[in-house]
Amino acid sequence: MTDTGHTGRQETAAPTDLPLAIELRGISKSFGSVQANKDISIKVAKGSIHGIIGENGAGKSTLMSILYGFYKADAGEIYIAGRLTPIPDSQSAIRAGIGMVFQHFKLVQNFTVLENVILGAEGGAMLRKAMAKARETLAALARDYELDVDPDAVVEDLSVGHQQRVEILKALYRQADILILDEPTGVLTPAEADQLFRILNGLRDQGKTVILITHKLREIMEITDTVSVMRRGQMTATVKTRDTSPEELAELMVGRKVLLAVEKQAAAPGAMVLEVENLRVRDEAGVERLKGISLTIRAGEILGIAGVAGNGQSELLEALAGIARGTGTVRLNGVEIALTASADGQSRRARGIAHVPEDRQHLGLIMDFTAWENVAFGYHHAPEYQHGLILMNNDAIRADTVSKMERYDVRPPIPTLAAKSFSGGNQQKIVVAREMDRNPDLLLVGQPTRGVDIGAIEFIHKQIVALRDTGKAVLLVSVELDEIMSLSDRIAVMFDGQIMGERDPATTNERELGLLMAGVAE
């Protein structure tokens, strides 16, 4: 047993009444001076669902990439079903009975389900014979594991949930006994996530072993038998799920107590800040992405936009931020703002709109530039940053960056460090500090905690609520339903570029929101 030091929790082995599917002994892996995995040992029982959680950079993905043959460990051994099994590449992993379902699916979109399943496993030149055999195998797998998918359907025509089933079928077709799933519910509706859990339970009941990588503690508690926690490249604990709690797991991940629930007073809405009427946006191909959106937000309230990614939320944020062009009417504090040629981010900022974009690395930061340069982006004309008529006062910007880093707990607090050198959570804090510290009338915030550590999630949530409490309006877009329900004062649900309905978070539930997210109206 290994004491983790902070919580007093001791590491436990996998259940002793079950044989082991996987045992990793002393796995270490470094990338240059960065040690991603340090002397990791873990046991996974056969016929179990084993969760692995940890903050960004904890080493979860590296460890699973070693198991699946993407990386070769610097030290350590892998045992599959009790036998020492070198895994130098992914083909070796597949031969060892390991399959992996990635967060971003590896499917050929214009191929059929059947073609995707047999791709790379055709079994010889007689393709027609292989296809017929694969069709029979798929029918049996669908019957045994509730993985019903039309084998002749083209993948791009399938829902995200059904595409995920195709990935699972691919692994099972290759006779995988061990399935690794990386953040499998990130793009699913609640109903699709529930269906996935039923499938995983069915796989376990049939003797398969499932390793689930996720940052969602609720899912860990709901679906896993055992959970391992990683922190800073090391394994801090492995516990039976029934013997732990979300609060304890969060503390094991971060090394301190974490407030999981968002603490906030009831909203006290004031004057109207944002009015959107019949907003329409077309993409470069002429496809209508927003189909007549209408909404309002008052001072001192958070309007959450729920929905599966790709249903117009991004276009809504971009139109309001001046990035995308649209038609319709948008008023800020009663004054109409431009939606066509004269619209841009600079004019929006001048009107009191701040924007934390969904993709911090492509829209929020220039990764090769320093933190202090990124803090000035979009606000470089601010009077406090000026030195004379045409020059920027770089010393003033750096001093302001140091102040922001301190107040927003950016680590390390080094303004001259390139943005790419910060962790994802600290990159997000730089963007949040730049936008929120300007005291905007309206904050547009997209996926505020995507890929962010649980400690940084707690901090960012507090900042959003604090801004609301100063009487500002917030438009929050997130695919995390827990985040939407805990932060929002009102919830609007988007599907296929339209608002399906609005709900009070105090009286609604995940099932009702999930139906709206799937396009099922009242």
Image (cartoon, rainbow, N blue to C red):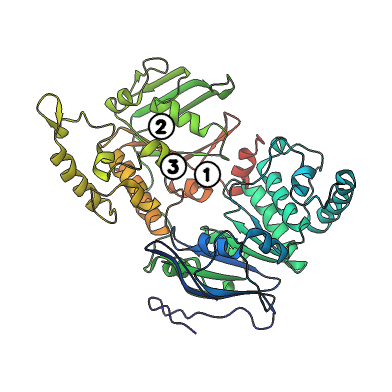
Where is residue 334? Give x, y as percent: 34, 21
Crowd around label 2: few <14 · some 14–19 · many ≥20 (10 Å): many
Q: Is residue 335 left or right of residue 312?
A: left
Q: Which residue is mark 2?
A: 297
Q: In the rendered structure, which disc, 2 or 3, sits on the residue that comes first in sequence?
A: 2
Q: Is residue 429 left or right of residue 36?
A: left
Q: Is residue 463 above or below residue 284?
A: below
Give residue 251's quadrant in the image. Answer: bottom left
Give the residue type at disc 3: Asp
Q: Which residue is mark 1?
A: 479
Q: Is residue 11 above or below residue 520?
A: below
Q: Nearer the viewer, residue 49 or 110?
A: 110
Where is residue 52? Give x, y as percent: 54, 65
Q: In the rendered structure, which disc, 1 or 3, sits on the residue that comes first in sequence?
A: 1
Give the residue type at disc 2: Ile
Give the residue type at disc 1: Val
Q: Is residue 404 left or right of residue 16?
A: left
Is residue 465 visible to the viewer in this orientation of the structure? no
Q: Which mark is residue 318?
A: none
Question: Image quadrant for the C terminus?
Answer: top right
Q: Which mark is residue 489?
A: 3
In contact (CB < 8 Å): disc 1 and disc 3: no
Q: CA distance from mark 1 to mark 2?
A: 20 Å
Is residue 76 visible to the viewer in this orientation of the structure? yes
Q: In the rendered structure, which disc, 1 or 2, sits on the residue that comes first in sequence?
A: 2
Q: CA distance from mark 1 to mark 3?
A: 17 Å
Per the image, label 3 sits on a secondary structure element best described as loop
Numbered circles on residues, count: 3
In contact (CB < 8 Å): disc 2 and disc 3: no
